[in-house]
Image (cartoon, rainbow, N blue to C red):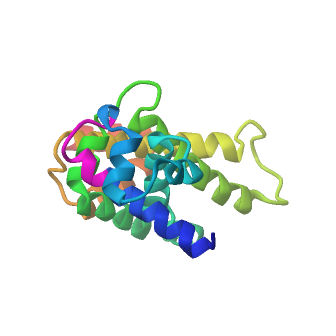
């Protein structure tokens, strides 16, 4: 199968999965339901994904993270955040349902692993061949830190009904990550 053919099937399965998610909890969705809705046979699903959780990871990576990767690599983090949060906002119903997925394959853990993978790549490329000031502060640890904080903000935003715009959320996130705890405490005292 060509790359285009595989990508088309992946997209078809993702759309089917997202539609089903709007009608029932992810935990209850079966592979058969996904393939029936997509109009393909079950073995086709398993040629593309191990399970529905890997499909969810593919959706997060393809629809949310890959579009922002070039922006992050070019130092356009604020713009990347607006695009990321806007893409979540466009699929508000889906992500509002997906964020309810708890347990071993929770939305939070799948999203964090996906964000970490993208950020690790960016930080490793940035650090390549350079001596680091702090040996303990590896690209992996930096990626994990930012992935955790970003996922916390996004999941909180989704769970509270996305009551502020994607642009405002990006401003809030930027405010937090660009200041030290001392700065924020000092600003709170002045308010």
In front here: 102 or 162? 102
Q: Quadrant of residue 158?
A: top left
Q: Is residue 74 left or right of residue 57?
A: right
In front here: 141 or 32? 32
Number of disc labels: 0
**Residue 7, placed above or below residue 148:** below
Q: Is residue 13 left or right of residue 125?
A: left
Q: Quadrant of residue 4?
A: bottom right
Q: Is residue 96 left or right of residue 54?
A: left
Q: Which residues are magenta?
A: 18-26
Residue at image location 72% in from the left, 43% down from the top: 138
User: Does residue 36 appear anywhere in the picture?
Assistant: yes
* Residue 132, percent from left and from top: 78, 49
In front here: 98 or 154? 98
* Residue 167, percent from left and from top: 26, 64
Q: Is residue 65 magenta?
A: no
Residue at image location 28% in from the left, 55% down from the top: 169
Quarter the N terminus occupies = bottom right
């Amino acid at each position: 199968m060509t790359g285009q053919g595989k990508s088309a099937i992946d997209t078809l399965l993702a759309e089917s999965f997202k539609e089903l998610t709007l009608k029932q909890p992810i935990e209850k969705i079966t592979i058969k339901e996904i393939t029936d809705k997509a109009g393909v046979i079950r073995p086709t699903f398993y040629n593309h994904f191990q399970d529905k959780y890997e499909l969810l990871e593919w959706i997060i990576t393809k629809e949310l993270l890959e579009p922002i990767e070039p922006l992050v690599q070019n130092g356009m983090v604020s713009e990347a955040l607006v695009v990321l949060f806007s893409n979540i906002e466009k699929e508000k119903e889906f992500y509002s349902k997906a964020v309810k997925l708890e347990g071993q394959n929770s939305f939070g853990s799948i999203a964090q692993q996906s964000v970490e993978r993208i950020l690790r790549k960016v930080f490793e490329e940035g650090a390549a061949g350079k001596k680091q000031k702090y040996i303990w502060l590896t690209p992996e640890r930096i990626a994990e830190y930012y992935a955790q904080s970003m996922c916390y903000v996004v999941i909180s935003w989704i769970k509270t009904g996305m009551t502020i715009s994607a642009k405002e959320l990006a401003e809030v996130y930027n405010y937090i990550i660009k200041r030290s705890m001392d700065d924020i405490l000092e600003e709170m005292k002045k308010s």
